[in-house]
Amino acid sequence: MTDLHRLSIRELSEGLAGSKFSSRELTEHYLKRIEKIDAQVQSYVTVTPEQALAQADAADALRKSGMANVLTGVPVAHKDIFCTQGIKTTAGSKMLDNFISPYDATVVAKGKVAGLVTLGKVNMDEFAMGSTSESSYFGATKNPWALDHVPGGSSGGSAAAVAADLAPFATGTDTGGSIRQPASFCGLTGLKPTYGRVSRFGMIAYASSLDQGGPMARSAEDCAYLMNVMAGHDAKDSTSMDQDVDDYVANLNGTSVKGLRIGIPKQYFNVAGLDADVKARVEESLKKLEEMGATLVEIDLNMTDAYVPTYYLIAPAEASSNLQRFDGVRYGYRCENPVDLTDLYKRSRSEGFGPEVQRRILIGTYALSAGYYDAYYVKAQKVRRLIQQDFLKAFESVDVIAAPSAPTTAYKIGANLTPVEMYLGDIYTIAVNLAGLPAINAPVGFDKDNLPVGLQLIGNYWSESQLLSVVHQYQQATDWHTKRAAIAEENA
């Protein structure tokens, strides 16, 4: 079959269960597409054909024995921030270019238990710091909708791989929008779960109180299948919450759009820099939800001006702490011929880290220094609590909150945005991470240049099922999530 890459996760599962094709055939199909197309997209850092085919054969054997799971034999791509045993795990950095992980991240291990076939590791901004996937040591990933544009970041490789049909779904991580923004730029559905819902064990840390793994796929239904694998308590992760996990697939129709109260923050739609096409497409999607029975309620989120400065104090501070372990001594990049220990540290870190990572380490180290800790870091943590309370107050009168996922569509590669311009592009996403809330991106149309636009829905804590359900019903009434870039239509 030449169109296996056009099938949904449910259709792939049913096809495998009905012996319409084998996992080996499916895996070979994706590997051939990667070989043919990915040179143009550059979504993969490492492709693992031998391991993938071995896993596919094992999946086929399980199918024959009658011991298969729903997803046994379905391929997946993992963001290169998740440790994978015996496979290079780089976090998009020269610092880890030679690192072969001795163990699996919990997300990867759960995928193996579910029978998923790992096609490889996909590209990302270095240590997840960036919004374009241009900061990767391995080069910029391209947006399948327009190869001279970025796919977003930091999970740009995950988004591009799915949007180019080089994987049926992919894992991503979201520290300040790194699932939702690339999903928006590439016309995908992407879910950032409640903080603590998905284990961070084996996920290379950027900002520990903000990082959260989640699924990226074409539809809410496809995301629900991967969430059923990823979610759950993990004793190895002290920030993992021991909270009951829903069956996200079974609950796809569990929330009725009829009667749903959708909060519309007036501050979000008057932000300087909000593109007119993005605003129009988001408002059209909200009108569609209103036609389906939802009620639009104007709300105030008064802490909007504090989002960017608060995030860009807390996240770099945590990055500074987390990345101190990369010192050229234990593992990772080491400079050549150091003259002494100080030279080893200085040159290994300055040569191993790229400019954006160095910039954030310096900002964070400054914010944590003795003279400025109280003035900056402690104050930012206090404002963070006010941002959380702002959301909780809003949820007293609405069920979900709507916003654009990004103020613009995808940037051109090499647009040379200043750091401040890039950081301001996160205005709609970072508050969700500061508050630890779940949020989802859904594709809702295109701008004048045929670049995808995304709607973001933000939920209260542990409302992943509700968000997936609302988007699923929207996707039953629209077809934006079925649109494909020209490069994705190519057959292997």
Image (cartoon, rainbow, N blue to C red):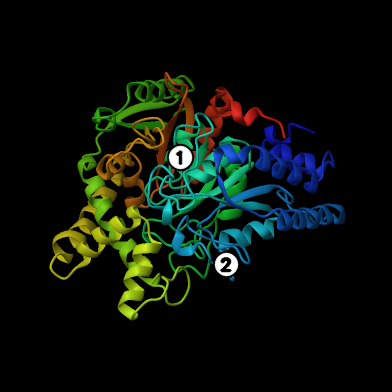
Viewer-side residue, 23 vs 302: 23
Viewer-side residue, 6 vs 289: 6
Left or right: 297 as drawn, with respect to 166: left
Residue at 76% from the left image edge and 32% from the top image edge: 2
Q: Secondary structure at mark 2?
A: loop
Q: Percent from the top left, x then y, of residue 21?
A: 82, 41
Residue type, label 1: Pro
Residue 255 in sight from this viewpoint: no
Q: Percent from the top left, x then y, of residue 293?
A: 46, 23
In this rendering, the label closer to the viewer, 2 or 1: 2
Residue type, label 2: Ile
Q: Secondary structure at mark 1?
A: helix
Q: Can you identify the residue that label 1 sits on?
A: 182
Q: Looking at the picture, does residue 281 appear above or below residue 209?
A: above
Left or right: 317 as drawn, with respect to 74: left
Q: Looking at the picture, does residue 333 appear above or below residue 163?
A: below
Q: Percent from the top left, x then y, of residue 113?
A: 68, 60
Q: Which label's residue is closer to the chain start, 2 or 1?
A: 2
Q: Can you identify the residue that label 2 sits on?
A: 100
Quarter assignment of residue 104: bottom right
Distance of label 2 from label 1 (alpha carbons): 27 Å
